Image (cartoon, rainbow, N blue to C red):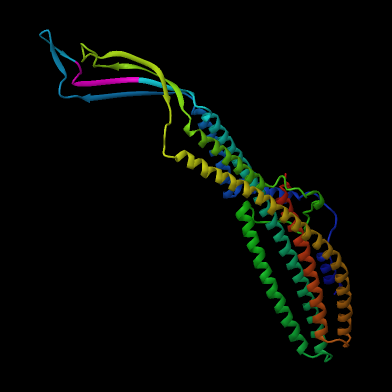
Amino acid sequence: MKKWLLGLMLLSSFSSKAQNKINEELNTLINNSFHYFSKSKEVENSLIVAQEKLKLTEMSRNPEIEAAASYNYIMPKISFPINGKEIQFAPVNNFSSSIGTSYTLFDFGRFKTNVSKAKSELQFSKDNLEAAKHQLANQVASVYYNIVYFKKAIAIQDSIINYYKENKNFVSNKVKNGDMLELDIYNLQSSIDIEENKKIDLTASLQKQLELLEYITGVKQSNGNTFDFDVNADTFSSSGNNPEITLAKDKVAIAKQELASIKLNNKPTMGIRAGAGFRNGFVPEVEDMRFNYMAGLFLNIPIFNFGKTKQQIKLQQSLVKQAELAHESTISANKKDIAQIQIDINANTERLKNCKSQIEAGQKALMITTSRYKNGVATYLDVANAIALLQKVSLYQLQYEYQLCLSKIELCRLTGNQFWK
């Protein structure tokens, strides 16, 4: 009898020592998820896309070299008699081949703005990857300690079931001697069946969490059996590193870069063009192919587009304002969430302190009631109430430990603190 009670005491014990780190198994699982989980791979690929886009934007300033060839059949034949001789001014069979290039000399900041925008988008992709890692690490840690919770809850159920089975064996011997009623055996078996069903539910939930762990990390087993995740909550009051806030800030920067780019739509561009090749059509021998070349400047000046640019600027200004408001809302919501999670941490810490005395009282009450029951002074209902009370308090303590652990994990996510290596 003392053996199962001691087991229940050990399962319900709470450690107040701060670890300020995570165990190696959880750390390994988190790092595995970064390379295994498909969503993480998707975000990593978006970073590669942003890097390639920046390279493409930087290359847009480079000159372009193009080759062209054409043939045209032109009728009617263009010719006039001059001094009794027919002079042809254009070939019937018109051939042309050339190689040309163009280069923009002045674009009034377009290239610089586009590069800045591409860099902002690249930074967003980098921060998005970090945000995905924080979210994934939080999910892995939550699943890991979900598994710990169900393991400990199952162990509590096993202790309760073993208690009922020991009592059933004791009562069976008493019934044989005529000291107890057979009804007590039926009551004990009914209690065993009820607790076994609870264990089945917990075991099914444990299996689901193990399947989820495999889905995220590729690993289906976990050896964790304690809530050893602990951080100093007092030092985690700042949200400056929160990934969601960083992403919201990046969106503001991208929106402003887009606005700057739109404002340049009405600016002119100036550049040079040059080319060389062969073609016919030169008088007087219009059919002969001859080498030719050209070089010059070009100037493009937007004149009027019926207010399209003005409306684009107005729209983008609204989008910038929207991004700024979203950034402010994210900061405000994050501060609220941090305050609430710290309240949860403090409350669960206090609850655990109170549970210690409740556990001790419940254990003493059960031992006394069990002794009285064996001596025929107490009834089976008294024992059932005592074990139900101890079980209830033990599960409460387990839930408080579990909730405290998850709250600390969530606090790390909200403050952007990296708890893995």
Residue 76, image x and y in percent? 15, 23
Position of 78 relative to 196 (above/below):
above
Which residue is at a point 12% across and 7% down the rendered structure image? 83
Position of 382 relative to 38 (above/below):
below
Residue 277, image x and y in percent? 33, 17
* Front one among 187 and 249: 249
Q: Which residues are magenta?
A: 89-98
Report if residue 13 is visible in the image. no
Taking the image as shown, residue 72 lies to the left or right of residue 301, namely left
Which residue is at a point 71% across and 45% down the rendered structure image? 241
Residue 284, image x and y in percent? 20, 11
Which residue is at a point 86% across and 71% down the rendered structure image? 358
Specify the principal SS of the magenta part. strand
Instruction: Let me know if residue 126 is in the magenta part.
Output: no
Instruction: Let me know if residue 97 is in the magenta part.
Output: yes
Residue 211, by quadrant, is bottom right
